[in-house]
Image (tube, rainbow, N blue to C red):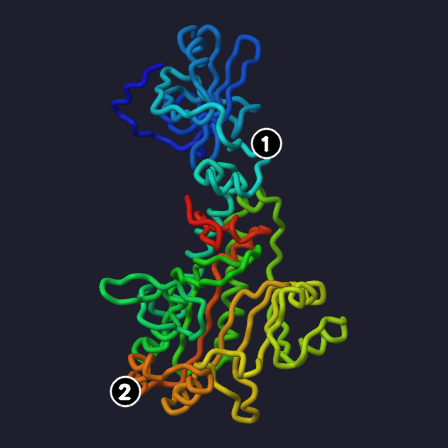
Amino acid sequence: MSDDAYDIRKTHFTSDVGPELDGKEVVLAGWVENIRKLGGIKFIILRDKEGQSQITIPKSNSKLFDEVDNLGKEYVIQVRGTVKKIEKAPQGAEIIPKEIKILNTAISPLPLDPSGKVDANLDTQLDNRVLDIRRPEKTAIFIIRHETANAIREFLIKKGFTEINTPKIIASASEGGADLFPISYYEKEAFLSQSAQLYKEQMSSVFEKVFEIAPCYRAELSRTVRHLSEVYAVDVEVAFNDYEDVMNLLEELICHLFKHIKKNCSKELMALNRELAVPKKPFPRYTYTDIVEKLQKEGVGINWGEDISTQAYRKLGELLEGAYFILDWPTAGKPFYILPRKDDPKLCESFDFMYGWLEMASGGTRIHKKDMLIKRLEEQKLEPTSFSFHLKTFDWGMPPHAGWGLGLDRLVMILTGSENIRECVLYPRDRDRLTP
């Protein structure tokens, strides 16, 4: 066993090692998952990003047999050896080593068990995130997250969308309100962006169909299982569309995504013990008024015009399973850029996309007339001059447009069956957590 690794390259991943390679020499590298002794044989379970392989050291190989005792869990090693076909081994093959190199060591005891056999509370997991994510069920969550973002991007591009990148340092609130993070920006005060909203609206007047997958920041004083201060959103905006059109687009995307994850992440879903049911189109559509009446019948204290509380959403999750829309919300409670309905201006062309009790997305038809937009800003006690950079683009021919913002982190929660949004974010940021 040597620690002077002159060539750290490997020829195969663990997933490549099977009975078809019987007799071939391979070089693997990864982490020591476990070490076992059974009579005159010692076993190393080697883990890499693809899975595990069994390294078998018989006592007859006295040098390596004795030196296995120098290894510890999570040591990084390189193994050169011969594949041997054996039915009882993982993937039907094991490796008889000729050489084992220690590339790096790990402390003992570790702050948590990366095999997942010993439970750790969420704070311990997040404090030791890199080690935590080595647990098979945690790795699975982030493979699914990767596949989710990739599938969304491919779906939208095939639909003719252009991906854009909008600034995350801004001079004024994207949507109004006070839930902003102020920052020092040279000699000025600036803010972290709440959303891509105004910029994606502007870009719809150029590319017509745009999207972005990026972070946004909300200084909400929340400590819940569904809120974070830094979240990733899938933002979409489409010219010459209204809220019905973009609801249909979102519905199609969700069905496509669930099918994609079910097909392409079966191993990860199995690691999570997750049965994923693909929603059926069309998703049920309830008006805000319908929902208020349902909740009132269940004894939930809510008056028409009020926002829906967490308690009320929990009740909705008991009444309505799976995917559905809530549309035609009161205009007064929605952002200034949402278009009031012509037939009843106290309602607006807006929607929330729900999955059980969890709000996943919100969207609607946008105001594309400058005078109406100024009026709505003033109604919400916002100063139009603070939005002059946005308002002037309406002088250059702004088309009718609509869009939505979908929470990627919450979407991964649903796909993976996670109970806390922090489990679905590599390094979550909330009211209490700024490290690691």
**Residue 257: which numbered mark, if any?**
none
What quarter of the picture does the C terminus occupy?
A: top left
> At 36% from the left edge and 89% from the top edge, which residue is drawn?
370
Q: Residue 182's x, y, as percent?
A: 36, 64
Residue 252, visible in the rendered structure? yes
Q: Residues within 10 Å of mark 1 (few under 14, many from 20)?
A: few
Q: Residues within 10 Å of mark 2 (few under 14, many from 20)?
A: few
Tell me the kind of residue under disc 1.
Lys
18 or 315, which is in the foreground? 315
95 or 426, which is in the foreground? 426
Q: Residue 111's x, y, as percent?
A: 50, 31
Instruction: Indicate the quadrant where residue 207 lies.
Output: bottom left
Q: Which residue is mark 2?
A: 396
For residue 265, above or below residue 244 = above
**Element marked by disc 1:** loop
Tell me the kind of residue under disc 2.
Trp
80 or 330, which is in the foreground? 330
Q: From the viewer's perspective, tell me whether residue 35 is left or right of residue 372.
A: right
Q: Which residue is mark 1?
A: 117
**Mark 1 to mark 2: distance in Å?**
61 Å
Q: From the viewer's perspective, tell me whether residue 306 is left or right of residue 244.
A: right
For residue 70, above or below residue 366 = above
